[in-house]
Structure formats: structure tokens, C-alpha cells
Amino acid sequence: MHKELSDEKLISLAAGEDPEAFGEIVRRWERKIFALCFGMLGREDEARDAAQETFIAAFRNVERFRGEAKVSSWLHRIAVNQCLTTKRRTRTRSEEFLDEETNEEERVFVAPAHAMPSVKTEQGERLYLVRQAVVSLPGDLRQVVVMKEFEEMTFQQISDTLEIPLSTVKSRLYTALKQLRGKLERLPIEVT
């Protein structure tokens, strides 16, 4: 019954007489929200937690959704805020536990290293280095790259989601891509 309904209608139902309608929102958006969180955080466990917290926060605030933005933009904004909170917590924890640094091979961009068919191939190695370069970008630049290049959002959607001017989105993407090119040119891979 819920599968045919729009996101906005599902949110309306979830806020009213049918809280189960929110389950369809989660089903539709969980992969994209996880991918966004993973792109911003670089760790699978943190991304999973941030995505879960995103949907919990959305469900708790479902009655406050006024339809001024698309449901997708609303969820992306909640996810971005959750990732920023997670990064602040992680930064504090890492300052306290510097000796407990995790394996750097797990800090990849889209998929954990063990999920790649062959990290040792030239293509796998190149992909790993590109992911590492993206993860090393400052957070405000990384989130724009993730949303534009990996989530395939438009500049306007990113602007709406992050609540920043369109010109800022474009300049952040330009700066991020310039920094990525500089990082990748120093590595033993071909930059196309």
C-alpha cells in the first residue's frame, strides 16, 4: 500500500494516523543516507550509526516537517548534521585515545577495503588512493564532493540541503576538486 505513495504523503501519514508509513521512507532512503554518511565519515561503523540516528531524529520530528523542502533534502540535512556531530565526538575521543588509532585501510570512501574485489590490482589501488584523498579533504569540502559526485545531487539540491548559497556550493566544489587534483598528482597514479 505504501510503495505507491510519494515521500511527502508518507511523511504526512507518519505524522498522523499511520506511523508505520515511516518504514517505507527508511526503506527508500537508507542506502543513500548511509552512502552520504560513509562519504563524510569514512568509517563503516560510524556511518551506520549516523544513518540510524538520522532516521531516529527524522521520526521524532516527523510532525514538524512542513513541506518547505523535499523529504530527501530534509533527510540529507539531518544526516549532514548527524555526521558533523559524530565528527566532533570522534575528534574529542581521538584526542583522548590517540594510541588506539584504527587501521588506515578501513578509512576508505565508499566501501570498506575488504569489500573490494582486489585491492592489489592497479584499478583497486587507484580507487583506494582516490578515496583516501577524498576522505582527507576538510569536512565542508568533502560533503559537497560526496553530494555532487557520488550522490549525484544538483547544485541547487546541495544548496537547499546545506542551507548555503548556490555560489558557495560551486566554489566549495571547485576548491575541493582543485585540492583533490593536487593530492592525486603527488601520488603514483595517472590523473585523468
Image (cartoon, rainbow, N blue to C red):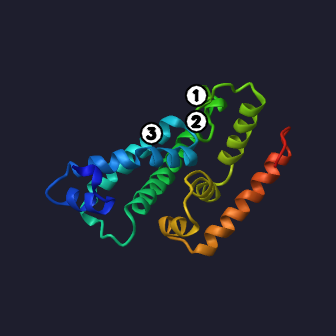
Residue 128: x and y in percent read 70, 36
Crowding around mark 1 (Cα neighbors within 10 Å: few <14, some 14 to 19, many 20+) is few
For the residues labelled 1 and 2, the Cα–Cα distance comes to 6 Å
Q: What amino acid does circle 1 point to?
A: Ala
Q: Quadrant of residue 122?
A: top right
Does dot 1 land on a helix, a strand or a loop? helix
Residue 190: mark? none
Instruction: Say whether disc 3 or disc 2 marks the residue closer to the N-terminus.
Output: 3
Q: Which residue is under mark 3?
A: 48
Q: What amino acid does circle 3 point to?
A: Arg
Residue 115: x and y in percent read 58, 28
Q: Which residue is under mark 1?
A: 115
Does dot 2 land on a helix, a strand or a loop? loop
In this rendering, position of residue 76 left or right of residue 136: left
1 and 2 marks in contact (CB < 8 Å): yes
Q: From this viewpoint, which residue is outermost toward the left?
A: 17
Residue at the location (57% across, 75% down)? Answer: 165
Residue at the location (20% across, 58% down)? Answer: 13
Number of marks in picture: 3
